[in-house]
Structures are given as structure tokens and as C-alpha cells.
Image (tube, coloured by chain):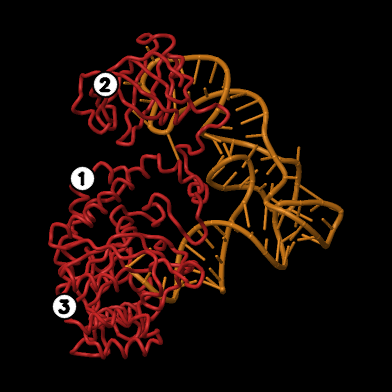
Chain colours: A red, B orange
Amino acid sequence: METSVTTTGTIATIATLAAHEGETVTLRGWLYNLRASGKLLFPIFRDGTGTIQGIVPKAAVSEELFETLKNLTLESSVKVTGKVRADSRAPSGFELDVQGLEVVQRVADETPFPISLKEHGVDFLMEHRHLWVRTPRQSAILRVRATIMRAAAEYFDNNGFTRTDPPILTPNACEGTSELFEMDYFGDDKAYLTQSGQLYIEATALALGKVYSFGPTFRAEKSKTRRHLTEFWMVEPEMAFAELEDILQLAENYLSYIVAEVLKKHQADLKVIGRDVSKLETIKAPFPRISYDEAHAMLADAFAKGLIENEHKDGDDFGSPDETYISNQFDRPVMVHRYPAAFKAFYMQPDPQDPTKALCVDVLAPEGYGEIIGGSQRVDSYDLLKSRIEEHGLPLDAFQWYLDLRKYGSVPHGGFGMGIERVVAWICGLDHVRETIPFARTLNRIYP
RNA sequence: UCCUGAGUAGCUCAAUGGCAGAGCAUUCGGCUGUUAACCGAAGGGUUGUAGGUUCGAGUCCUACCUCAGGAGCCA
């Protein structure tokens, strides 16, 4: 430890400095930037809660303190003591008149902090993600993420749901579709990383009524877009005695709550991120609802008017450009329901009005962020589910336990899954989900 | 897997087939209100890899590698 002139003051964090105006406090953090103007230094400190500029006139401090700070390297860790002073020139409204400094660890001159205040490329930043997270924007995003995750669990905790997390290691593909990460399970057996906990929480929903799960999910798909990670966090509610209408209402109330929580607690962070909060203030239930058929008509009309490039074929799933167009017609998330059953999962309940359609919903976030929630009412008939499993060419024995749920007191039930990273990307207005998680796992990257 | 694009100084990028450069960062010097501070100077290069065309290749051709954006699939 290298020590310079030290004085003591009340330990404080930058976020709470307004409450310490006029007081002498000690901050513990890092040197974020340093500007010098002859006999005047302007160090900027960060401590994880924010940044503040210090001011150090040569005449006001000891020679030792001045020289130590003048030669200090960026991202060196420090304890700095000074008097909090309101100043209209400061972005946060406050500055610190530095009186004392203890250098905890000085970054060596030969190995300067690699991330500068200037622009960097994506590859370089991701290669240095362990250091990139220190920058104000990335820290702000991670704070918002934390609030979104807390609100995502809190809403269910406050509304009668019991958290029941499913296993991460599973014996087979939950839905028999996506590519999974495979691993050896003590020799004879293979295990797979979960792609969804849904089937398991259907079991716990029939035990506890209303349940949810919240955890990491894995997809080995070679997806390479701004919306995909190979490891991401998903929150999934499941309710017994619930039909599609209940699921729609839950989804709109849920998202409204999460957005409200972020707006309530993160105005400063959203400003650092550069988010237009007026786009979030409109996010209140009820959300617009359109059926697949209505969405198709909307796309057909748009194609006729030359607003979109590719014609959407009735009966086909929507592509990303289609979803973007649909979501751009609304100022809040749009709930698209009753897709053709043909390209949806085997466990979705058919619509009694039109059995070729499934009682399902995709919630598309505004501003082109695409699908953030996918849900459905589940098949509750034993015979129908059995024939669906067979039609999809899935192994019956692997799904016997799942069929059992329809044998012992089956009820209408359903729920949805929400991808946390896509919600964070949308709420923060980010270009790519890789910035929404501390260490993103993508197709081409597993370091650091 | 497919399509498109990009790899040049630590970083971000320039360079008609003809001497490989700038800004930032680093080091040194100057400046008492800077806001990605500014001004001056210095150091810093096997142009992704391997071949090929050419008097001459960062530049053109072939293959490969890496990364990015998109499609498909999905949350």
C-alpha cells in the first residue's frame, strides 16, 4: 500500500453526497479521470455509485498531496477526503475540495488502464469486459438490470406466487426442438443444460397453484444477432386454473410494474445511459392486443403500401423485420395472440373457436426490440397431449411424468417466459443484449 | 449453416498499385475553472495468416483465421 497525506472524514458514497454538503467526507473508490491546469488539478473519482470531480489548487494543499495526485494513474484505487461543495458548474451539482488522499494501489505507468474515454470497438471492449464494467454507462446498465431482476421476482412474491426453480441439468430436450448444450452425466447418461423450466413448473403449479422460476437458461443455437445470448436469464410464471386471458393480464401488469420500478429508482442512470424516458412513461397496462390474423392483415397492408420489403405469407411465423414493423405501430408492448398451432410448441392448447390456432401470446416490445415474452395456455387433456408428443416425434417415455400431470387432477393452466436481457436492452434502449449482463456468453465468445 | 462487411501503432481510424500517417493513450514540458480540457515535444509498426500477380502490394487475386451485422431459430 502506498500512502500519501491522509485525513479522515465521514465515510460516504458519491450517490449520497447531496446530504453531506459542507461536510468533510472520505470517499473510497478509483481515479476515473484527471485534468490538470498548471497549479490546479481536476481529478474525477468514481466509487460504483457515481462520479464526482475534485478540485485541488496547488496553494491549498501540501506539496506531497499535489505531486502524488498530479502523477496518479487512471483507475488507481484511492481513499480521498474533502469538503463537499455545491457548484453550478458540476454536472451532479457538487464538487469535492480535496484535502487528503490515500493511494490504495497505484496503476503502474507501464501498464495504463486500457479503456480510455474515447471510443472503442466491440471486440476490444468485450475482450476487456472485466474492465469495461467500470465505465459509468456500463455500471448504470448493471444497476438497472439489478432493479429489473428484483422487480421481476418481487411482483410475483407480492401476488401469491411461490418460487420453485427447476433443475438446470435435464435428461432431455424440454420441447424437443432447440439445440442444447450436452454434457456427460457419469458415463452412461447424457445431461443437457436447460432451455426452459416450463415443463417442471407446470408440475409445481399443480402443487402450489401459482409459481414462478427464475434462473439461467441455455441455448446452443448458433444465433448471431443483437438479441441472442447462449446463456441468458429467464423468469417464468405458471398458474393453475388459468386461461389465455389470465396470462395476457398477468403479462401487461407485470411489465408495467417492472418499468415503473425502473423509472422510480433510476432516473440518473437512465440519463447516463442516454435513454429517452418519455418512451418508457407510456408503458402502462392495458397493452394493445391483436390476433395473429390481424397482425398478418397489418403486414399485408404494409407490403401493399411498400412499407416493408418482404411479403408475409399467411400461416408462416413472423420474421424479425415483421415483428419490428408490428411493434412500431404501438407506443407500448403489443400482445400478439392465437398463432397457427402448426409452428408452435406441442404443449399449447388449441383454440376451441379455431383448433388450427394455439392459445398463445408473444409480447413484442416497442422500438423494434422484438419478442420479450412468449406464453400460452397448456394442453390439459391427457389424450391430446399424448398424441401431440407422438406427432412431434418425441419419446413418450421421457415425457411420462409430464403426461402424469394430465392424469391426476388436470386443470386449465398456463404461463409465460420472459427473457431478462431483452427486457433490459429495451428499457435501457441498448443496441445489443451483450451489454445487459455482466459477462455475456455469445456464439463466438466465452472470455473473460 | 447461409449472406454481407471489417482486420494497419496500446485504442479509434486514414493512406490513386509508388517514402506507413493522424487523433487519443503513454512519457516529458507549459497553463489557476477544466468538462472526452487545451498547447508543445518524444517514443511507439513483421499492415490478421499463408501463398500468388507485379519492377514495386496496406491496396489486386486465392485459401484460411478472427470479429461484426443480418437471416433462420428463439426469450
- Which chain letter matches label 2? A
Question: In the rendering, at what x and y percent does residue A173 appear?
Answer: 40, 75
Q: What residue is shown at x 16% (from left), y 60% (from top)?
A: A284
- Which chain letter matches label 3? A
Tell us which disc is closer to us: 2 or 3.
3
Mark 2 surroundings: few (<14), some (14-19) or many (≥20) residues within 10 A: many
The image quarter containing residue A372 is bottom left
Q: Residue A265 got which mark?
A: 1
User: In the image, is residue A116 above or below residue A37?
Assistant: below
Question: In the rendering, at what x and y percent does residue B2 appear?
Answer: 56, 74
Residue A72 falls left or right of residue A293 = right
The residue type indicated by label 2 comes to Val
Q: What residue is shown at x 48% (from left), y 47% (from top)?
A: A125
Dot 2 or dot 3, earlier in sequence: 2
The residue type indicated by label 1 comes to Lys
The residue type indicated by label 3 comes to Glu
Dot 1 or dot 3, earlier in sequence: 3
| CA distance separating discs 1 and 3 | 34 Å
Q: Are marks 1 and 2 in contact (CB under 8 Å)?
A: no
Dot 1: what SS?
Answer: helix
Residue matched to label 3: A243
Q: Residue A6 got which mark?
A: none
Q: Residue A25 got which mark?
A: 2
